[in-house]
Image: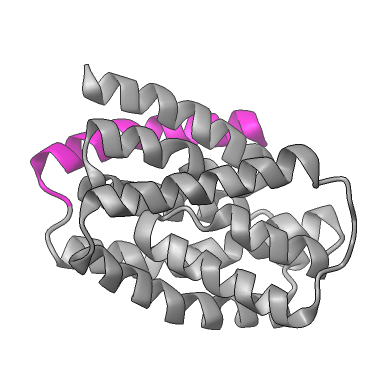
Amino acid sequence: MEKYLFWGAFFFAYLINGITGFAGNVFAMPVGIATIGHETSITVLNCTGLLASILIAVTGLKHIVWRELVKMCVVMIIFMAIGAWINTVAPLDVLTKVYGVAVLVIAIRGLFFSKQHKSLPEWMLWCILAIAGLIQGMFVSGGSFLAIYALQKIRDKDEFRATTTATWVVLNGLYSAYGIGTGGLDGDGLLVLAVGIPLLIVATWLGG
């Protein structure tokens, strides 16, 4: 039953991800922690996030803003590594509380402040980019924080979608290799991933 709950949430999450180019794991990760476990969720969602990003990015190569792509990748890779290290030393109950606060902050901002187009100072944007990397390393869910940064730097919808998904190709590719190398994809994880891939393809197509 736990796996079916995860797959249902996963399909919905990647339907949203197919529309926006980000935020799929924000929906999928909380259900994953409660059903298939934290470590398995990280590895599975990194692998599926990589595939989803490739499916979206290959159709928008000409729209990528390369300067911003390089900046986002460099900063987030550094802090993603720190987040992955925190995962190995912090208790799960502490991590889930941190994640809950992060999701609430994103939700409150989206509900009440998303239509206020006030520009954030450059130093704050760099901080947000660093937080995106940390959350990505801890919960593979840094997309919403990255979107706060990217929406101020990239105004065109096609450029935004192509550049953010290209970022996830790089980040999820690196983290997937790390997760598989450390044994994060066991028998159960492989089953969840095998079923998730066709769900991902259908959801991404519908979202597009």
Residue at 44% over, 56% down: 50
- Residue 169 in view (yes/no): yes
Q: Is residue 204 magenta?
A: yes
171 lies left or right of 72: left
Measured along the vertical axis of the image, is residue 153 above or below residue 18?
below
102 lies left or right of 57: left
Measured along the vertical axis of the image, is residue 198 above or below residue 148?
above
Which portion, as a residue range, is magenta? 185-208
Screen quadrant of the N terminus = top left
Q: Nearer the viewer, residue 148 or 107?
A: 107
Q: Nearer the viewer, residue 127 or 94?
A: 94
Residue at 39% over, 32% down: 198
Task: Characterize the magenta stretch by its predominant secondary structure.
Answer: helix
Q: Is residue 30 magenta?
A: no
- Residue 52 in view (yes/no): no
160 lies left or right of 94: right
Q: Say which quarter of the image contains residue 195.
A: top left
Residue at 62% over, 62% down: 146
Q: Position of residue 140 (x, y in %)?
A: 41, 55
Extreme top residue here? 1
Give the colour scheme of this rendering. Answer: one colour
Q: Position of residue 161 (x, y in %)?
A: 71, 55
Q: Position of residue 67 (x, y in %)?
A: 72, 82
